[in-house]
Amino acid sequence: MQHGRDNFSMQVYKESMWALSSYDAVADTPDDDRGGPDPSAYDLIVARRRDEAALKQQLRKHGDAEMRGGAAEAPGGMVRAYRLKAPGARAKKQPHNHPLRDLLDQMGLKHGKDIDACCGKKSGGGGDGGTVKIGNWERSGVAPLANPQKAWALSPAPNAHALCLPAGHCTAAVGSISSGKTVAIQSAIAQNAAQWAYESAWLMHPDSDAALGGEYGLCSGMKALDEFKAMDWWNTNSPGRTCLCIDDVALNALTSRGGQAGQRALADRTLGYLRSHKEKSMDIYIGTQHIYNLPPGLRKYVGCWMLFPKRISPSTYGALATATMIDKSVLKQVLDLVTTQYGFVMINNMVAKGRPRVQIFDPDPRWVDGEGL
């Protein structure tokens, strides 16, 4: 109910027989019971401010819907008023709103910490999943230079799963139809979400709606993205740590019309800059049936390659060798090590500390998952 004596900024309900408002306690009690005159204007203002502060505190603790009785709308389209709770009332445990929850549940994983909570931590070498911080300094040049946009440039812990990659990575899976690349991509997404939680996830696909209801059905909370977006769009619509999956999109057919606002320029900006400089970072996963679907201008930004030898044409080995920065004859020997239909080789161009550059993922008993060459 809203008092008419003052111009309240928020509506406050009374619950049961307890005076929920200090204003009620001061102003609504009969003079005989109160044992004094009516409250002064100052008393009313102090009581009102106290009520507003209590309501704001409870809104932060319990949430808007809970403070309105569990629903914002009442029958007839009316908006429910706020109801103050008794002091000390415990907040209901809210379900996590992280995307990909069903995928992680399927794999028996839990969402990782917010990446902000991991900045500055160093691995203790134990099983706590600690991280090694590169920090907000560029250390690859002749002298370290401060770069606050690198605050989230973290490397996976040495004891992390082999599919855990540095924050802000770009990974491409190459294999023809029925190679298993979509399963591998989703496995990598889950492992990296368990390392540092994603706050939003997006899918670019020729038929996004069907894919989200089909092969990406476990990626709950993942949204369709119809085209590459500008940086301002990402800052507004996906402000936290982001997962972007680009599957079976003909990136070699992107148009250059529109100049810097065209799809080719925006794709270059997304893969080359946004993923590593966006607030809390953006991890990009690309699935393509043929390496030539990924043009050289974008190919150079891929830091990790997942190659499925049983579904790759040997005529593309030259382009793959250039992309992975491995001699063609050596690459062929590595790919020949995979013996099963769905096995793949993971090659890192940007090797995290304590990780091998080449790793074999193959159900063949000769190989142990995660151990590299």
Image (spheres, rainbow, N blue to C red):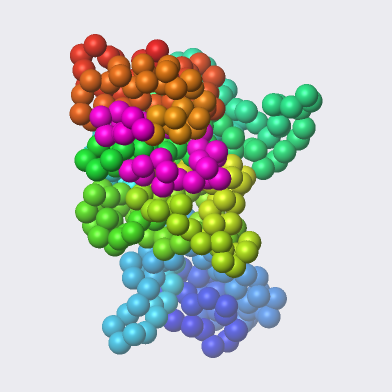
Q: Position of residue 367 (x, y in %)?
A: 27, 14
Q: Position of residue 174 (x, y in %)?
A: 36, 37
Q: Is residue 339 above or below residue 277?
A: above
Tell me what residue is drawn at x 34 percent, y 70 percent: 71
The N terminus lies in quadrant: bottom left
**Residue 219 visible in rendering:** yes
Give, as a single range, the part of the protein colored magenta: 288-315
Tell me what residue is drawn at x 52 percent, y 50 percent: 240
Choose between 168 and 110: the one closer to the eye: 168
Residue extending farthest front: 315
Left/right placement of residue 37 relative to residue 55 reads: right
Q: Is residue 94 magenta?
A: no
Q: Is residue 74 above or below residue 331?
A: below
Choose between 223 and 317: the one closer to the eye: 317
Tell me what residue is drawn at x 21 percent, y 17 percent: 364
Q: Is residue 117 above or below residue 66?
A: above
Q: Position of residue 263 (x, y in %)?
A: 53, 60
The C terminus lies in quadrant: top left
Q: Is residue 306 magenta?
A: yes
Choose between 17 and 338: the one closer to the eye: 338
Q: Is residue 206 above or below residue 307?
A: below
**Residue 186 visible in rendering:** no
Q: Position of residue 39 (x, y in %)?
A: 63, 79
